């Protein structure tokens, strides 16, 4: 047989081409394997729960300003030195107060058109707190009001009166960043969700504060909100972030207040600091989900914990705010309210006394790594401390520019609420002079929840405000990135 091989066929070249083709295929397989492996490691929920806690080294807060009042800043007295703190008008300008070492600063401001932005760096940022308070003992806006200066966020909640119950509801939105923010407002009422396209796409320009009047404009949810006696307001950004504060004016000489930001929806909540004394007390509960909630209610007073008769179980409709009168259950006692539900809820309280109003909300417990810090105490100041599950002990110190008091230890028995008066660190401090307070749980202490009541006057001239105390931010959790291949694939 004559194979008649053609002389122009180069067998070596053919073998080289075949080897390159299979080598390329192998490289493709290796790349796919690496990509699959990276996708596996970066898939949400698959990474191990590792990481470390690092000290907070930057902080930004916004005090709503506008109506004037006192701005107070308090650093963690045991924090590390270094860094700086400056509070300036949000639109720009010279600092109204600044700090370069641990301590306290304050500034009285007049009514104006701007908010104030606090920026802190270094060791001074860990545990830093700021508060704005206003006090007017006469006039149409008579009242004592306080607000924890707000941190920028993307999803924020408020709970309190609606336009039926208040003359004015002013939402202050501040953008501290260099890019515009876009905000959507949604709301729940006692009659259910307030479905409307109003309140969407609110633009907040960089370094500005926008005031949205709820129920008085299309941005403020329009006419649909005008019939709401109780209101749960959700502030969400579709781009950027904002700091939000909500001011309430009940009516001429009937009280003013800043609503505290609500805790995120959760199935188990504790609301500290329901004030004692005369006047109406109401529990407010909102169910943001699609299904009704069944809630167990417990009242925790200085005398002990109990389920209020006839109010121990609350059935709350979905997407609705439910109001429950607490006067009969509390009988004028200082208290906390514990709620355990079968689905996530929001909760707070409304209180009236004398010529003023106050509002509270659920809080997380304090911790040694995140103590409670209150920047502006004066007049009659008192802490309300509750230990729902076990005995707790806290250490309290007060401080001003002249120095600090010695530590005071307060024991809170299990299932009890304790009220303790605060005193200025110096006996010769002027009447009305402000001072800070720090509350630190002792080692081995059970969880403790706290609020501060500030008051002045008597009977019909009584003015007050309640400040729910949240743990000061001293550390941030950094995830463990060792061995991660997430940089190989685009983020989701």
Image (cartoon, helix red, strand yellow):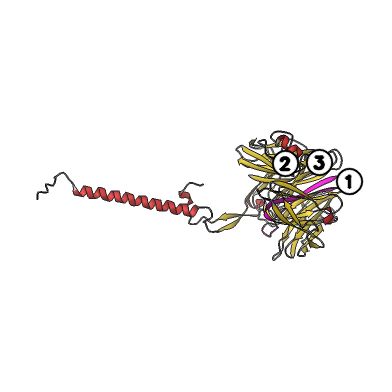
Chain-order first, disc 3 or disc 1: 3
Residue position marked by numbered label 1 in the rendering: 461
Q: Pick the residue in front: 43 or 426.
A: 43
Q: Pick the residue in front: 478 or 345.
A: 345
Asked which secondary structure carries label 3, the reply is loop
Q: Pick the residue in front: 105 or 225.
A: 225
Residue position marked by numbered label 2 in the rendering: 64
Gap between marks 2 and 3, in whole Å? 19 Å
Chain-order first, disc 2 or disc 1: 2
Gap between marks 2 and 1, in whole Å? 26 Å
Chain-order first, disc 2 or disc 3: 2
Which residue occupies the extreme top position in the image? 217
Which residue occupies the extreme left position in the image? 1
Q: Is residue 199 left or right of residue 164?
A: left
Range of magenta residues: 341-369
**Callout 1 environment at 10 Å: few (<14), some (14 to 19), or many (20+)?**
some
Percent position of residue 157, x then y: 69, 46
Percent position of residue 420, x then y: 81, 58
Query: Is the stretch drawn in magenta largely helix, strand or loop?
Result: strand
Magenta span includes 191: no
Q: From the viewer's perspective, is the residue at label 2 or at label 1 nearer?
A: 1
Residue position marked by numbered label 3 in the rendering: 250
Quadrant of the rendered structure where residue 142 is? Answer: top right
């Amino acid at each position: 047989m004559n194979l008649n091989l053609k002389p122009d066929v180069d067998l070596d070249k053919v073998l080289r081409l075949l080897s390159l083709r299979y080598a390329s295929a192998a490289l493709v397989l290796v790349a796919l394997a690496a990509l699959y492996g990276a996708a596996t490691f970066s898939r949400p929920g698959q990474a191990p729960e590792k990481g470390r806690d690092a000290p907070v080294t930057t902080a930004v807060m916004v005090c709503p300003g506008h109506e004037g009042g006192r701005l107070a800043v308090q650093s963690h007295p045991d924090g590390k030195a270094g860094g700086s703190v400056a509070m300036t008008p949000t639109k720009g300008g010279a600092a109204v107060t600044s700090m370069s070492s641990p301590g306290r600063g304050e500034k009285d401001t007049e009514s104006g058109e701007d908010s104030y932005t606090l920026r802190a760096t270094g060791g001074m940022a860990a545990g830093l707190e700021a508060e704005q308070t206003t006090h007017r003992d006469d006039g149409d806006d008579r009242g004592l009001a306080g607000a924890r200066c707000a941190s920028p966020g993307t999803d924020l909640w408020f709970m309190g009166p609606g336009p039926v119950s208040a003359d004015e509801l002013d939402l202050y939105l501040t953008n501290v960043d260099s890019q515009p923010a876009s905000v959507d407002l949604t709301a729940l009422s006692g009659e259910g969700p307030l479905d409307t396209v109003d309140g969407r796409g609110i633009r907040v320009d960089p370094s500005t504060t926008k005031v949205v009047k709820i129920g008085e404009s299309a941005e403020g949810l329009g006419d649909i909100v005008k019939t709401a006696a109780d209101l749960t307001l959700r502030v969400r950004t579709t781009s950027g972030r904002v700091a939000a504060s909500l001011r309430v004016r009940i009516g001429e000489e009937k009280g003013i207040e800043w609503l505290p930001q609500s805790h995120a929806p959760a199935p188990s909540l504790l609301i500290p600091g329901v004030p004692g004394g005369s006047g109406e007390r109401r529990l407010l509960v909102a169910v943001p989900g699609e299904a009704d909630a069944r809630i167990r209610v417990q009242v925790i007073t200085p005398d002990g914990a109990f389920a209020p008769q006839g109010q121990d179980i609350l059935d709350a409709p979905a997407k609705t705010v439910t109001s429950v009168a607490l006067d009969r259950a509390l009988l004028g006692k200082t208290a906390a309210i514990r709620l355990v539900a079968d689905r996530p809820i929001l909760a707070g309280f409304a209180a009236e006394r004398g010529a003023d109003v106050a509002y509270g909300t659920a809080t997380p417990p304090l911790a040694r790594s995140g103590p409670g810090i209150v920047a502006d105490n004066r007049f009659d100041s008192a802490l309300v401390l509750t230990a729902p599950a076990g005995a707790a002990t806290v250490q309290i110190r007060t401080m001003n520019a002249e120095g600090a008091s010695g530590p005071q230890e307060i024991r809170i028995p299990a299932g009890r609420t304790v009220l303790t008066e605060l005193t200025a660190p110096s006996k010769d401090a002027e009447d009305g002079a402000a001072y800070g307070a720090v509350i630190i749980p002792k080692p081995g202490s059970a969880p403790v929840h706290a609020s501060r009541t500030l008051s002045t006057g008597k009977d019909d001239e009584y003015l007050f405000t309640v400040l729910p105390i949240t743990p000061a931010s001293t550390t941030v959790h950094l995830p463990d990135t060792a061995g991660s291949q997430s940089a190989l694939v685009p983020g989701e």
